[in-house]
Amino acid sequence: MANMTDRNTGGNNLVNKLMQAMYTSSTSFTITPGTGGGSAFTITPPFKLRLMTATGSNTANGTEASGNGYTTGGNSMGSTAFGAPSGGVSTNSNSVSFTASGGNLGGAAIVGIEIWDTAATPLRYLQGSITSVTVATGNTLNFASASISADASQW
């Protein structure tokens, strides 16, 4: 079957509208499925960036870093995690930093990142691999604004 998602490069298309609703809101909101079934879920910002010592996949979470300056659950991406999307792609609005203390950050090489909400039972929204990096005591791993891309251009 032909791909039928509206991905026009302008801001007025389905993918951009979905990305904007999900990742640029600073308040929680609930998505309720229609007559097709499924269960409602609430998107709960702010989103948090988690560091992974084993990369996740589209169907499984990665292994979250632990210790040596890394706080379980990750660091906040700010009240608005991503900027307005264009062509189904949006980048992070704020920088996010992690500083190692008492050994290598997270206890091992960091090979992936994941973005989770802050609900009572957090949900993972995005995942991806990064070039492996080991962050020694006193050093900082910084993700500058616009350095993380959320890409829904192939939805």
Image (cartoon, rainbow, N blue to C red):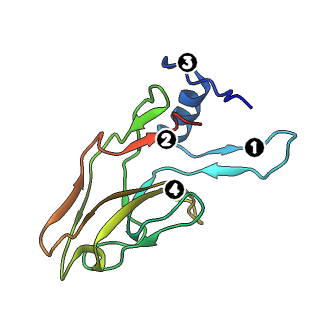
Q: What residue is shown with label 4?
A: 117
Q: What residue is shown with label 1?
A: 32
Mark 2 and mark 1: span between their CA atoms?
A: 17 Å
Give the quarter of the image for residue 29.
Answer: top right
Q: Which amino acid does the dot numbered 1 rest on?
A: Thr
**Residue at the image position 27 percent from the left and 48 percent from the top:** 95
Mark 4 and mark 3: span between their CA atoms?
A: 26 Å
Which of the marked residues, 2 or 1, is nearer the chain's N terminus?
2
Which of the marked residues, 2 or 3, is nearer the chain's N terminus?
3
Q: Which amino acid does the dot numbered 4 rest on?
A: Asp
Whether label 2 touches label 4, CB < 8 Å:
no
The local secondary structure at tag 4 comes to: loop
Q: Which amino acid does the dot numbered 2 rest on?
A: Tyr
Residue 66, horizontal then vertical, whole percent: 35, 78
Residue 33, horizontal then vertical, whole percent: 78, 43
Which mark is in front, 1 or 3?
A: 3
Q: What residue is shown with label 3?
A: 12
